[in-house]
Image: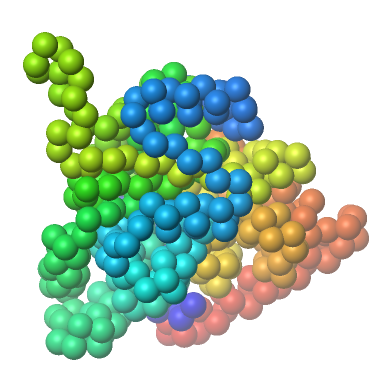
Amino acid sequence: MKHEEVRALRKAFKSVKERQDLNHLNDIYARSRRLMSSRELCVGNEILLEEAVMNLRKNGIKVHLANTKQEALDIILDEVAKEKLIVKSKSNVTKELELTKYLEKKGITVVETDIGDRILQVMDQKPSHPTGPVTHLSAKEIAKGISKYYGIQVKETPEEIVKIVKGDILSSLEKANVGITGANAVTSEEGSIILTHNEGNINEVMRKQKHIIVTSIDKLYPDIESAMNMLKILSFNATGSIIPSFVNVITGVTKTADVEKKFIRGIHNPSETILVLINNRRREFVEKGFKELLYCIGCGNCLLHCPMYNTIGNEYAIDSYLGGKGLAYHSIYSGESDGKLELCLGCGKCKENCPLKLDVPEMITKLRSKGTSSEIYFFLKSHILWVYYQALLRSNSE
């Protein structure tokens, strides 16, 4: 990552921390304990998962269970059918599947409708934060990149950039018949799917003729109340806001009971709601003793406080697997201990600032070290590299 990108990243992270200081989430510690209880209960709980699937189907939602990445991709392609334009919203699970790349190889145009993700897409950049993907890019750099893509001169202001990118997105939204989103939670008791966003783009994407929701089995919660508690903690840690601008709860397809109280389905779009629930090796995480990693709600607060990430940015990452937690996840998922794990300082700042207090440094130690001597070596190596990168950053800013 370029030095100016690291500085832009630090500036953005600082603004989030300032909002966190200004705002106040009531009973945050009690809420965090409740969240941990629900994560411990649900992650890896096959009985609750079966109950959720049963209730989702009862509510009229078409549910696919996909065990592998390829199985999920094939299901989604089959649901897309003959459509050649897809609009989608931000989703870490679809990034994990490399869904956009897969659909594009099949001759399908995929347009990201989140402003940040669309900028990443047209500039062919990697994300720097799960909820703020272009945090590392300045308005000047973005304007230069999208000017080249759209073939026009875009002013170097956030307002002008958003205006141009929004116009592009709206054009695709008008033409598309299929929308793909992720989901923040799936609830067992109600058979509901919960999505949260600030831009309002999900409202547009989910109103296409067919709405395909792609998420993973670890997004399971016992009920709507526990999922809403998670959303408040997620929003506060990700952006400093108490609650996102929009929260959508989907508990079935469009229907009416206005005439003789008889339910008639398919009144408005979407006429069909499909949920693709993927495993993609998550059960292996539980079996290998890394169940805790699946508790993560993806708020990215660990990145705000990680000294190494604040020094080299998404060089301390692999694609959308960001920071120590992301690298640990990728290492287990791929079955290979990635060399970037050696960059972890073991300082514990990520654990300290995680709402669930996930012990990522301990997980990294288990993955990268064979004993005390090797961990001492990695500890010294990471600190020497960090001091070196800090010096480079300082000298470049002078």
Q: Where is residue 15 in the image (x, y as percent from the top left)?
A: 32, 55
Q: In this view, does 239 lie above or below 166?
A: above
Q: Of all residues shown, which one is farthest toward the left? A: 259
Residue closest to the eye, 33 or 286: 286
Residue drawn 28% across and 41% down? 272
Please give left or right for residue 371 compared with residue 79 in the image.
Answer: right
Please give left or right for residue 264 compared with residue 320 in the image.
Answer: left
Q: Where is residue 44 in the image (x, y as percent from the top left)?
A: 63, 32
Please give left or right for residue 398 compared with residue 384 in the image.
Answer: left
Residue 374, quarter of the rendered image: bottom right
Q: Is residue 237 above or below residue 107?
A: above
Q: Position of residue 227 (x, y in %)?
A: 41, 29
Residue drawn 64% across and 59% down? 330
Q: Of all residues shown, which one is farthest toward the top? A: 260
Q: Is residue 394 visible?
A: no
Residue drawn 35% across and 47% down? 212
Q: Where is residue 48 in the image (x, y as percent from the top left)?
A: 55, 23
Label total for image = 0
Residue closest to the eye, 295 or 310: 295
